[in-house]
Amino acid sequence: MAADVHHISLRVSNARRLVKDLVDKFHFSLFTERVGEGVKQFAVRSGSAIFVVNERNSGEELVSQTGLCNHDAGVNAFTERRDGLSRECHHLYDFSDVDTPVDSVCNVAFEVEDVDSSLERVVRAGGRALTDIKVTEDEQGSVTHAVVQSPIGNVVHTLLDKKLYKGLFLPGFDVSADSWTRKSSARLSRFDHVTYACPRGASPPILEWYERCLGLKRFLVNREESEDQGFIVQGTDVGMRLKAFEFWKCAEQGLRLPGPSSDVKPKVKFVIAEPLPGQGPNQVETFLEQHGGPGIQHIGLHSPDIISTTRQLRAAHVQLLKPPDTYYSEIGKLSEIHQVGQSLSALQDNGVLLDAEADAADDEHCNNNQRYLMQVFTKPIFDEDTFFLEIIQRCGATGFGAGNITALWRSVQAYLDQRMQLENRQNNSSQ
Ligand SMILES: O=C(O)C(=O)Cc1ccc(O)cc1
Ligand SMILES: [Fe+2]
C-alpha cells in the first residue's frame, strides 16, 4: 500500500497550552483550527511535519448535536459501527472511543491512494475499522477518510485521500484566528520516526499487523541487529529490544538511484521498543505504567541544522537530556566526530549525540561518503513521564546508532531516578 504520514494527532487536556509551546519553543506555526461548542482542534506545522492538537474534555455528548458531522459515503460492508459517528465527529478525522486518562499521542494519519481499497485490505487482513468511510467537503473540494484501530494501545490510524482537495489542510478546519508563528533560522523539516513502547513479547504481532494490514516492511536498525531477535540494547542498567519498519519506498516510486539529486521524500520510520526481562523499573515500563498501556513514546523530528535548532531550544528553555559525562570521552568518539567533520565542542555544549555508521567511520578514505546521524532528546513534554520529542539530523545514515541508544537510555534513566528521589523526599517531608 503506497502511503505516507499526513499528520499526527495528540489528545491533551489543554490544547492551547501545548500549541503555544510548539510555536514558541519548537517554532511550529499554527495555521488552521476547528473550534466550536465542546470542540478544540488546532493544526501546527513545521516543514512537512503536522501535529493536530485535540483537546480532550467531557463534552462529547454535545457534539452529536452541533451539526458538524459530515455525510457518510454510504456503502460499507465491513465496518463495526457502534456509536462511533458522534464521537469521531467530536475530533474530526480522529476517533475517541476510549479516551485516554492522560495526555497522549493517539493517531498517525496516513495519506493513501485509495481509502476503499486500503480499508478493504486492512479488514481482510484481520484489522478493525472503527468508522465508516466518510466524505467531508467544502468549497475547496472533498476528502475521503476512515479510521482503523492499530495493534498498539490507544493508537489509531486515519486513512485519508485528499487528491480531490485544494484547501489548506482538511475540510472542517478554518484558517486560524490567531495564526501564531515565529521567525526561525533552524526550522524542523519533517517527521523522521515514531517510536512505540510496548510490553515484553508484544512486538511480533505488532510487526505482523503492520506488514499484513498496511504493507510496511521491516528494516534492520543497525548492523548489529539480528533478524529474529531485533536489536538488543543491553548493559548493566540498560535493557530493551528494538525493531523497526517503514513503508517500502520502491513499491511506490520504482527503483530510483538514491543520491543528492534524488527528490524522493524520505519516509517516516517506525520503531517498537519492548523491555527485556529481569530489568528494574525502566523507561519503557515507566511509559507503560504512566500512560496506562502501550502507545507512542517519542517522535523524532528532522532538523537540517541540529546545532542551531538545539541552541534555539535551549534559549527557549526547552529541557533537553544531557548524555552521561563519559559519552564524549568514550574511546573512539572524538575521532568519529572529527572524521565526519563535526565539532566536539558544538556537540558537547548542546548535548547532541553523534553516531557514525561503522563502515563509514572506520574507512579513512570514506570522507566524502560519511554516513552519520546526530540526535538530541527533550524531557517528557506532558505532565507524566511519558511522551517526549527527539531532534535528529541524518547525514546519509538511515538506521539508529547503538551508542546513541545506550546514551539516550542512560540519560533518561538518570532523569527518572532523579524524579523518583525528589518524589520520595517530598513524600517523606510531608509525613
Ligand atoms: O534511537 C532512537 O532514536 C530510538 O528511537 C530508539 C529508542 C527507543 C526507545 C528508547 O527508550 C530509547 C531509544
Ligand atoms: Fe528515536
Image (cartoon, rainbow, N blue to C red):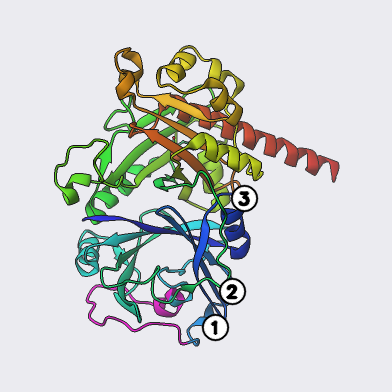
- The picture places residue 211, in percent across and down from the top left corner, at 24, 49
Q: Quadrant of the C terminus?
A: top right
The reply, left or right, for residue 46 in relation to residue 268 is right
- Give the spatial CA distance, label 2 vs label 1: 9 Å
Residue depicted at x 56% and y 59%: 181
| Depicted 239 relative to depicted 54: above or below | above
| Mark linked to residue 58 | 2
* Above-or-below relation of 122 to 385: below
What residue do we see at 60% from left, 49% from top? 25
Q: Earlier in the sequence, mark 2 or mark 3?
A: 2
Q: Is mark 2 within 8 Å of ligand 1?
A: no
Q: Residue furthest left?
A: 254
**Residue nearest the observer in this picture, 268 or 33:** 33
Q: Tag on residue 62?
A: 1
Quadrant occupied by the N terminus: bottom left
Mark 3–mark 1 distance (CA, rounded to whole Å):
29 Å
Element at label 3: loop
Q: Secondary structure under badge 2?
A: loop
Distance between the alpha carbons at the discs numbered 2 and 3: 20 Å
Query: Magenta residues?
Result: 67-88
Residue 305 image position (x, y, % from top left): 47, 37
Three-letter amino acid code at the position of disc 3: Glu
Give the number of the disc on residue 251: none
Q: Are marks 3 and 1 in contact (CB under 8 Å)?
A: no
Secondary structure mainly formed by the magenta segment: loop
Q: Which residue is mark 3?
A: 384
* Up-down relation of residue 100 to residue 428 (above or below): below
Displayed quadrant of residue 363:
top left
